[in-house]
Image: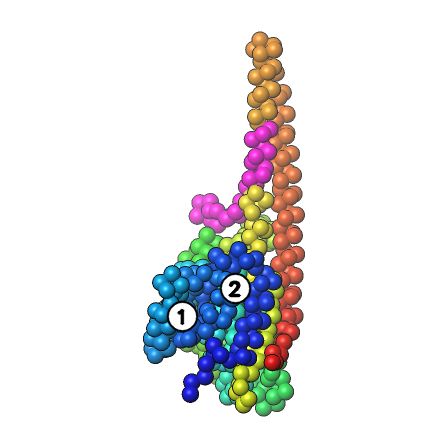
Amino acid sequence: MQHSFLEDPMKQLNRDAYAGFIRRHKKPKELRNASVLCMSGPEMSEVLALWDGLKVKRKNITSVEKGDDEYIELEERVAQEPEGQRIKTEKADILDFLRTTDKQFDFIFLDYCGMFDSDVRQAAYTISRRQLLKENGIVAINIREGREDLVKQSEYVLATEWFDSGITVSFDDIGTESYDIGALEEKLAREVIQEYEKHKKTAEENKDKLKEFRRTSLARTIIYGMFCGKIQTQMPELYPPELIEWTVKSVRKMYAKVNELTEGLLFKREPMFARAYAKNDVDTLMQHSWFMIQSQIAIINHFQKLGSNSNVFHYLEAKARRPYFLQDMECFRYTSQPGNSSMFGAIGLFDQRRDFFDENNIGFYFGKENGTLMIYNGDTRKAQREIKRAEERFYKKAQDRSRRRRGRNNGIVSREILDREIEGIKSRDLRRQGEYIRQYMQFYEAQLKHMETFIPNVRELRL
C-alpha cells in the first residue's frame, strides 16, 4: 500500500512547524495574495495541509511534478476541485523548471524524496541567480537523510568544505597588480591534494560527524546559494562579454592544468564542475570560486589603476548582483515511520535589502568613457532636489532685486554665492554617500561572518 503523506502525522508536524515560521514573518493579508512554488505531491497534500490553512489563494500556487504517473494523478486530483479552486500544475524536473521559469514567488518550497546532492545545491543557486524569490521571501527545502552510500556522504563533505573554504576572495597570495599564473596553478593543485587527503577517509573515520555534516550542509547550502545572486554574464555593465570570454578560457586552462598536476584528482573530487568543463557549461563554471577570483581580480585591477575606491566597487557590484541575505532560519528533523530514514528540512527568510541601494542616497554608477569602464560620482536624487531648490531661490531673489532696483541687478556676486552653495551641497552629498557605503560594507561583512560561523539549531519533531 502506498504511503499517504496527507495522512502522515509526522509530516503534518513538519508542516505545522513551517506554518509557525511563516506566520511569524508574514501578515494574513500578505499570505492571501502570496505566490507559491511547491512540490505538492500527487495527493495535493502540501496544498491541503499547509497552504489552505494559511489562506493562500490556490490560483497563486504552482506545483511541479516530474513522474508521469504522479503528474497524471495530480492532474486528476486538481480536476476534482471547483474551477476557481484549482492550483497550477507543471510537469517538469524541479531544477529544469527553476532554470526556465520567469515568474517570481513569495514562497519556494522544495520537498525532495531523495538525499542531499548537487541538484539540491543547484536549486538554491538557480533561485538566486535568476532572482526567482521576491523581496522578503521564504525558501524551504526538505531532504531524506540516513543510509547514504559513500558517494552521497561525500556530497555532504564537499558542500560543507566548499562553504568553509571561504566566501570572500582574498588577494594576498596572488597580488592585485599582477600574479604568476603558473605559481597559482601549482598552489591550487597542492590545496586540492591536501584537502583530498584530509577528507578521503571522512566516511570511515568520522561517522560520528556525519549527522552534523548532513544538517550543516543543507542549511549552509541554502544560505550561500541565495547569497550568490546573479552571475557575471547577467551583469554586462560591469563584466563585459570580452572579460567573460577571457575568464572562461582562463579558468578552463587552469582546470585542465590543475587536474593534470593532481593526476586527475580534481575532476574526481568535483564531478559537477568536471561535467561543466567537459560541456563548456559557463553558468556552472562561474559558480566556482576560481572563476570569482579570476574575474574579480581582473575588474578590481582595472579600477585600482583608475584610482577608484574598492568599497565603491564592491557596493556597485552588490547592487548589480542582487544577493539575498538571510534574516532568519529554522531546521527540523522527523521520522515518519519506525525504521524509515529521517527527513531533514530547513526554512529561511531572505531579504535583498534594496533599501541600501536607494538612488535617493547613492549617486555612484558604472559607465564608459571612450570604451573604458569607469565609476562615476553622480549627485544623489536628494542632492539634485536640494540644488534645484537653491537655484529656484536664487532666480526668485534675482527677479525681486531686479524689480526693486529697476533692472540694476548684482547678478555676478549672487551667482558666485549660488555656485558656492551648490558646491557645499555636492560636498555634503559626497560625504553622506561615503558614510552610506561604509554602513553597507559593515552590514555586508557582518553577513559574511554570520554565514561563515552559522551552525543550525535543529528541532527534533515528535508526537
Image spot of residue 254 (x, y percent) = 47, 72
Magenta stretch, residue numbers? 365-390
Q: Earlier in the sequence, mark 1 or mark 2?
A: 2
Q: Position of residue 184 (x, y in %)?
A: 54, 71
The three-letter code of the residue at mark 1 reads Val
Q: Residue at x 34, y 69 (%)?
A: 79
Tell me which corner region of the image, top left, top right, bottom left or bottom right, holds residue 67: bottom left
Magenta stretch containing residue 385, yes or no? yes
Q: Position of residue 93 (x, y in %)?
A: 39, 73
Q: Is residue 127 visible?
A: no
Callout 2: few (<14), some (14-19), or many (20+) C-alpha neighbours within 10 Å? some
Task: Depth check: give the residue in front, 17 or 426.
Answer: 17
Residue at left offset 61%, top offset 26%: 418
User: Of the numbered discs in the image, which one, if any, rests on residue 54?
Assistant: 2
Residue at the limit of the structure toward the top, as seen here: 406
Numbered disc total: 2
As drawn, 190 above or below 58: below
Badge 2 element: loop
Give the numbered dot on residue 64. 1
Residue displayed at 57% across by 34% down? 385
> Label 2 is placed on what type of residue?
Leu
